[in-house]
Image (tube, rainbow, N blue to C red):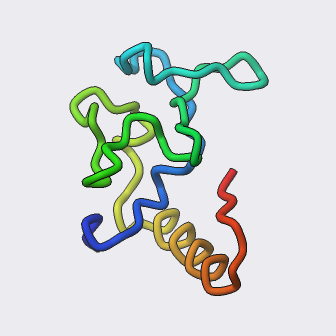
Amino acid sequence: MDCRRCDAVCCRLPVLLLPGDRVPSRYIAIDEHGLETMAKDEDGWCAAIDPLHLRCSIYEDRPAICREFAMGGGACIDIRARYRDQRQRGLPLTLD
């Protein structure tokens, strides 16, 4: 699995911030439950993603959940399959 050959679908998933995460405040949002999450842009992408290169602009300070997400692991494969299915059927991408 090579992230450079992917549409970075994982970067549209909700990311709950944990104590100890060092995410810059401009990338933090508060969800409907009052929990800190990674902010999203108007298209639903993680606000920390460099849209030109589809890479994390805060890689060294990315949240623990992002650090633990296994590239090519079960969750990655499932999310990519769901994305491909929705895209082929012309459905909007919904990952929340």
Which residue is found at the position 36% from the left and 17% from the top?
Answer: 24
Seen from this angle, which residue lies furthest bottom? 88
The quarter in which the N terminus is drawn is: bottom left
Q: In the shown orientation, is residue 86 left or right of residue 33? A: left
Q: Position of residue 68 (x, y in %)?
A: 38, 45
Q: Position of residue 67 (x, y in %)?
A: 34, 41
Seen from this angle, which residue lies furthest left? 60
Residue 61, above or below 53: above
Q: In the shown orientation, is residue 34 left or right of residue 74? A: right
Q: In the shown orientation, is residue 9 left or right of residue 93? A: left
Which residue is found at the position 69% from the left and 67% from the top?
Answer: 92
Which residue is found at the position 53% from the left and 51% from the top?
Answer: 12
Residue 96, above or below 84: above
Residue 72, above or below 89: above
Q: Position of residue 41 (x, y in %)?
A: 53, 38
Residue 13, above or below 22: below
Task: Decide which of 51, 70 is in the foreground and name it.
Answer: 51
Please identify the quarter of the rendering in which residue 32 is found.
top right
Labels in figure, total: 0
Which residue is found at the position 65% from the left and 57% from the top?
Answer: 95
